[in-house]
Amino acid sequence: MATPSSSALAAFPTARFASVGQSLAAFIHYTPSGYAFKTKLAEIMRGSANAALIADGIEIAPYASGGSFASALNHRAADSSAGVHWDDILNARGSICESAWDRMDERDPDNLVQHLLADQGQADASVTAGLYVDATYPVDPTDGANNWYSAWHNHLIAQYRENMDPATSRKIAWAMLGRSTSSSITDSIGYHRIREKQNLLITNNSSIIFKALETWDLELQDSVHPSIVGQIIYGHRLAESVAKNIYGVTTYTDASDNEVTIYDGPTFSSVTLEPDNVTVKVVLAGDAGDTIFMPSREGPPPCGFMFWDSSVDMNAVYSTADPFPGQRPKGDWDWDSGDKEITFTLATPITGTLKMAFPFDNVPDFNPDLVIKGNTSGKPLQTKFI
């Protein structure tokens, strides 16, 4: 579906979204990412001729709540006041995003939210890394990610959708966990655990939730939040994904009267350990119009990859003092652009089943020059676990 630049405002009169999660979800309401989302969605859905009416009818209700779901199972299901977090909007201690749910419940029934924009998990990454201690509701670090998944999968999805407009598909657009430069979580696997559960949550609820965007490559302004440039990119990516996955738009005419195809970014096709147990072949896939950008083979390998043996204890808590026993690729690597195949070499043989995470944890080896991405879209290689 292409939306012509002359399309009338009436063709897309309203869109009401709720942003739910932690600080990054609040950003989509009051920072440049929110404005970027609205303007790009309006450009896609209404056409650039309606730029003067860019904000009319596109609403983002700020239901973001801080803190962690991993501190306990969902409050309402557990019938307790177990939540340990700060509510960003009300500035008051509350249960596990229940304040957000309550605000949606109290919303004018004639002005219901249609779809949810979710960006949640940053604080949970610290919880699952064993860095959060609460005397009343202690967290077993190895259970934190499971609690997080259970809260969303078993309770929160249905609860939020209960207060959304039943005349719509009530989709949930999910932003994948980004990265962090905080020294308190470097070399832990808290980010890995939550990102893995996010991926599972999307897979197991694919009729409701879709992966809206990858955020691990965005420029940061501090240890976790995107810079203004990163926020704008975030908003644009989110708008394209919402237009494609909710409204079925795959191409649109931009403000410069160019026809733009909405691409998702490169993906993994296969990951194979060769018989020598140190060579890993990674085959990528990408759209014909969005060829794959690969860092120079004369430099370090692309960032974000981590490989390990299946014998590694994934329930252990790893830290700087006790680092995760995985392997990043060695410096000698190759890229075959014709076959879209990367050849990596590991320092130590894999004796069991090969495991891989991309991007791994808080992406401690991040380098903007070493990001695999689409040449046209600029979107990074998508999350993958094996």
Image (cartoon, grey):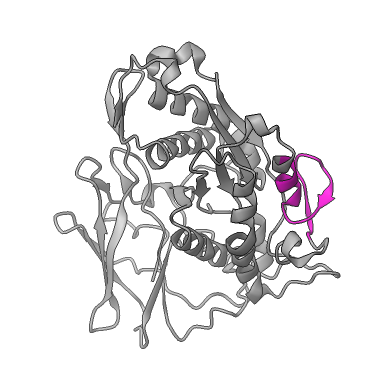
Which one is in front, 318 or 283?
A: 283
Counting from the top left corner in percent of width and height, residue 364 is at 51, 60
Q: Quadrant of the C terminus?
A: bottom left
Counting from the top left corner in percent of width and height, residue 96 is at 73, 56
277 falls in the magenta region: no
Quarter of the rendering containing residue 152: bottom right
Start and end of the magenta stretch? 83-103
Q: Is residue 57 above or below residue 330?
A: above
Left or right: residue 194 versus residue 328 is right
Residue 121 appears in the picture as rendered: no
Q: Residue at position x 44%, y 16% from top?
A: 9
Left or right: residue 58 versus residue 184 is left
Tally of marks: 0
Q: Residue at position x 26%, y 26% from top?
A: 259
Counting from the top left corner in percent of width and height, residue 106 is at 75, 39
Counting from the top left corner in percent of width and height, residue 149 is at 59, 65
86 falls in the magenta region: yes
Left or right: residue 342 versus residue 79 is left
Q: Residue at position x 23%, y 84% from top?
A: 275
Q: Residue at position x 37%, y 87% from top?
A: 352
Q: Quadrant of the N terminus?
A: top left
